[in-house]
């Protein structure tokens, strides 16, 4: 696969390369794992890195017109389940 020198790297790629500036260093407390940053002897928390890259990718796709995001307030039909305040359903019904 050839790369074009005129192409700009994706937002996800740039965030991954600069992750040590954006994401807490060290291991994740829940997974006891860490992600190594390329070209540096630095390890960062993988959950925060994944969340940061995913959010930036969604925003980049939205801004380029490749993706449309809509927030919708949904009430649960199950009377026994109470959704915590401020939480939104993230899957379709």
Image: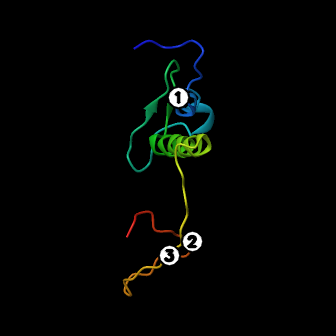
Residue carrying label 1: 13
- The crowd level at tag 3 (other Cα within 10 Å; few <14, some 14-19, many 20+) is few
Disc 1 or 3, which lies upstream in sequence?
Answer: 1
| Residue 13 vs residue 74, the one in the foreground | 74
Q: How many marks?
A: 3
Q: CA distance from mark 3 to mark 2?
A: 6 Å
Quadrant of image for the C terminus: bottom left
Q: Quadrant of residue 10?
A: top right
| Residue 36 vs residue 82, the one in the foreground | 82
Residue occupying the point 55% across, 76% down: 85
Residue occupying the point 55% across, 60% down: 70
| Residue 62 vs residue 42, the one in the foreground | 62
Q: CA distance from mark 1 to mark 2?
A: 32 Å
- The crowd level at tag 1 (other Cα within 10 Å; few <14, some 14-19, many 20+) is few
Q: Is residue 7 above or below residue 54?
A: above
Give the label, 1 or 3, closer to the camera. 1
Residue occupying the point 46% across, 45% down: 47
Image coordinates for residue 45, horizontal then vertical, percent? 48, 40
Mark 3: secondary structure = loop
Residue carrying label 2: 86
Q: Decide: marks 1, 2 in contact (CB < 8 A)?
A: no
Q: CA distance from mark 1 to mark 3?
A: 35 Å
Disc 1 or 2, which lies upstream in sequence?
Answer: 1
Image coordinates for residue 46, horizontal then vertical, percent? 45, 40
Residue carrying label 3: 84
């Amino acid at each position: 696969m050839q790369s074009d020198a005129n192409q700009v790297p994706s937002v996800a790629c740039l965030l991954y390369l600069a992750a040590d500036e954006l994401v807490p260093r060290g291991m994740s407390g829940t997974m006891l794992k860490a992600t190594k940053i390329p070209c540096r002897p630095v390890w960062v928390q993988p959950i925060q890195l994944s969340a940061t890259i995913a959010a930036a990718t969604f925003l980049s796709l939205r801004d380029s017109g490749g993706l449309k995001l809509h927030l919708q307030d949904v009430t649960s039909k199950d009377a026994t389940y109470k959704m915590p305040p401020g939480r939104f359903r993230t899957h379709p019904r």
